[in-house]
Image (spheres, grey):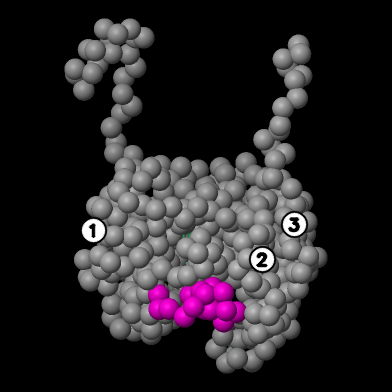
Amino acid sequence: MSQLTVSRPDPYLSEGTSPPALAPTFAPAFTGLRCRACGTPSEAGPFFVCTRCLGPLEATYDLASAADRLTRADLDSRPSDIWRFAELLPISVLPVGGLRFGASPLTPAPRLADRLGLERLWIKDDSRNPTLSFKDRVVAVAAARAVEFGFTTLACASTGNLSASVAAAAAALGLRAIVFVPADLEAAKVAQAQALGATVVRVDGPYDGVNRLCLELTDELEGWAVVNVNLRPYYAEGSKTLAFEIAQQLGWRRPDVVVAPLASGSLYTKLAKGFGELEEVGLIDPAPVRYIGGQAAGCAPIANAFVEGADICRPIERPDTIVRSLAIGTPADGRFALKLARDSVGGIFAVDDALTIDSIRLLARTEGILTETAGGVTLGALRRAIEAGTVGETDEVVLVITGNGLKTLDAVDDGRPLPAPIAPTFDAFERWWAGR
Ligand SMILES: Cc1ncc(COP(=O)(O)O)c(C=O)c1O
Ligand SMILES: [Zn+2]
């Protein structure tokens, strides 16, 4: 009896569940929204398009004032999650409670580096977030804002990973979650969102239709915070925290090359915004970074436009790829991503499904990290960039792994049946071993 009641530290009540505390000096540098196309400012609210030109709105900051307040030592001493960088995020109140997001490891990858012929390769393993993808970062910021604006329902149009992030963030903040996904989504992703308490709406056809439906619903229904529609300017800023962490983990500096996947192109462009803001507030020195992006060849509107030298993307009406998480035919940030790839002397590469699968296996077997299909595309893009000479042996490279392989196990299923079970005897094992 006493053994059953003995008290021991409860792992579920350790630092993981305490509300994120922040340095007492927290004062937001966030100043409002501004149109990315024509520059017209807008007040902070659940708005996402410019009233003058219908361009996308983006968060703005008073970086000069943040520069006076932020020091490396102060940031290093804060609790390790995304709120460490609260001054550079579009929130004015820190969420109380909720999950802890971010602070994923930046790990040297010497065995993979060797296989690729690189001297310095790091993996930013963002599959280690509460719901196993980087989408937890963007949802954390959107959910914090949803609470500030007084919303009680959190919703999204998702290619899969976002649905679990919305479901989890909503559960932990006591909000209702409704997620819209393409009907052909991987079963594991639907099950994950459902288990986390979300209402899952499966919509026929590809993601673009799901997105259009959510735009319409945002118009029609009051009181819904659709994280990647009416909260998109806040949501998108969450991806910057990946760049903030990479710089901090490298000792407050930038790598030569960052490699990331693109669906809408938001994460890819926000990595550059993140490094740029750190430079503006004086936390890192100026240095060029080449941004390498990956898209699935069966849905590669941005990679195609890059190769063609075009400034805008031709929509892909029928994505045809195993990489469902990146299957967005009309990418909202496509033209910004193209500009970044060209300005930074990087590149955006299309990766076919065979190279994606091979890259998932390569990463798993060299570094012990099992990524989802998006991660296979990311490593595939790095391999293509090395072949093209865009990345060279002496470059310091950070590979951003954005999702966990348990969500897309079908992709690495080689069709072989499970090994037959053996009797628990040495003889049986010996026979089995010999007959392998
Ligand atoms: C695992 C994963 N990586 C990357 C992305 C790309 O996101 P973005 O739309 O910001 O380009 C997604 C989008 O759904 C994703 O699920
Ligand atoms: Zn405008």
Question: Closest to the observer: 165 or 185?
Answer: 165
In the rendered image, residue 40, in percent from the top left (x then y), is placed at 64, 91
Question: Closest to the observer: 180 or 236?
Answer: 236
Question: Closest to the observer: 385 or 146?
Answer: 385
Other residues around mark 3 within 10 Å, as few (<14) / some (14–19) / many (≥20): some
Regarding mark 2 in the picture, which secondary structure is present there?
A: helix
Q: Which quadrant holds residue 262?
A: bottom left
Q: How many marks?
A: 3
Regarding mark 3 in the picture, which secondary structure is present there?
A: loop
Quadrant location of the C terminus in the rendered image: top left
Q: CA gap, disc 2 to disc 3?
A: 13 Å
414 is higher (above) or lower (below) than 193: above
Mark 1: is the Cβ under 8 angstroms from ligand 1?
no
Mark 3: is the Cβ under 8 angstroms from ligand 1?
no
Question: Closest to the observer: 400 or 304?
Answer: 400
Q: CA gap, disc 1 to disc 3?
A: 43 Å
Any magenta on residue 278? yes
Is 271 on the left-hand or right-hand side of 116? right
- Farthest residue toward the front? 73
Is residue 391 in sight in this rendering? Answer: yes
In the rendered image, residue 22, in percent from the top left (x then y), is placed at 73, 61
Q: Do the residues labelled 2 and 3 touch (CB within 8 Å)?
A: no
Is 314 on the left-hand or right-hand side of 208? left
Q: Name the residue under label 1.
A: 117
Q: Mark 2 points at which residue?
A: 74
Regarding mark 1 in the picture, which secondary structure is present there?
A: loop
Q: CA gap, disc 2 to disc 1?
A: 38 Å
Identify residue type, mark 2.
Asp
Q: Give the range drawn in magenta.
A: 272-289
Q: Which quadrant holds residue 390?
A: bottom left
Identify residue type, mark 3.
Ala
